[in-house]
Image (spheres, grey):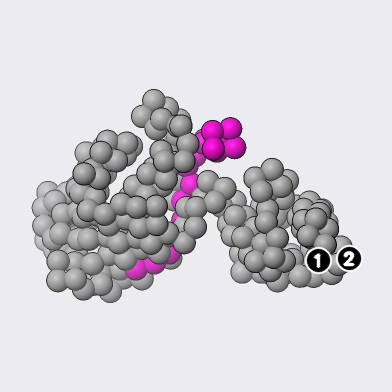
Amino acid sequence: MTRTEILDELKKVIAPYTTNKEMLASINEQTDLIKDLKINSANLVDIIIDAEAKYDIEIDYDSADKMVNVGTCIDVISEKLNQKA
Amino acid sequence: MNNHILNHLPYKSSFRFVDNISLLSENEVRGEYTLKQDSFFYEDHFAGNPVTPGVIITEIMAQIGLVVLGIFLILKETDLNFDDDENLFPLLTSTDVSFFKMVLPGQKVTVVSKKQYFRFGKLKCYVEMLDSEHELVASGMFSGIIKNIDLKKNG
């Protein structure tokens, strides 16, 4: 999967956890999940769990720590997808 | 038998809403609380017509359904000692509760909570409150974390 493909999928994963739909439509790799999308920090856990189910991957503590903006989320997801392949 | 866990609860006197834990496992907790006739909120909510506020119902559900189970899981999975560290305290991060029946002063309620997941320090549970007739008082999804805990180091 390309980064753009993952980004498009990621939008759908994030959608239930942000009320800022305008910002969500225009996210890029620099978009911060908490500061820009105003996601409740505890709900990052739900996003991680939903991403695991969607991509059939497992995200450990250290990887989860890195997932603060859209770019680092894509890094972690593509890394785990590559490990699986 | 399960009530030793109550010694670890950080709430005191007027804000402790757990009397007894009747069932406690990794996936489920059941506990009871009897609303005190002289609780501070009845005087003003409402004057001459005391009804338990929804926020107190929510708090009872959170203390039994999330905090008791959360402390149990942390004591089981880590070597953290809750009582020695005043910086550690539980925080509610989200609730979504529906209310079905009023609770009046002196009534006994039972809270049943089923774990959805406990990951990255966050506990999410589906919690129900029943009255003494086993009728549903309130239900909803609750989530919380322990503030200042470092599970990576200790877990």
Secondary element at image label 2: loop
* Residue B19: percent from left, percent from top: 19, 48
Please give left or right for residue B86 compared with residue A72 in the image.
left
The amino acid type found where label 2 is placed reads Thr
The label on residue A2 is: 2
Image quarter where the N terminus of chain A lies is bottom right
User: Could you tell me residue B13's position as x and y percent?
Assistant: 22, 39
Within the magenta stretch, is there residue B143? yes
Answer yes or no: do the residues labelled 1 and 2 have beta carbons within 8 Å?
A: yes
Q: Residue at x 45, y 32 (%)?
A: B80
Same chain? Circles 1 and 2: yes
Q: In the depicted view, which residue is nearer to us: B27 or B100?
A: B27
Q: In this image, B84 relative to B111: left or right?
A: right
Left/right placement of residue B131 relative to residue B71 reads left
Q: Quadrant of residue B82?
A: top left
Work out whether residue B117 can be spotted. yes
Name the residue beneath numbered marker 1: A6
What segment carries the magenta color? B139-155
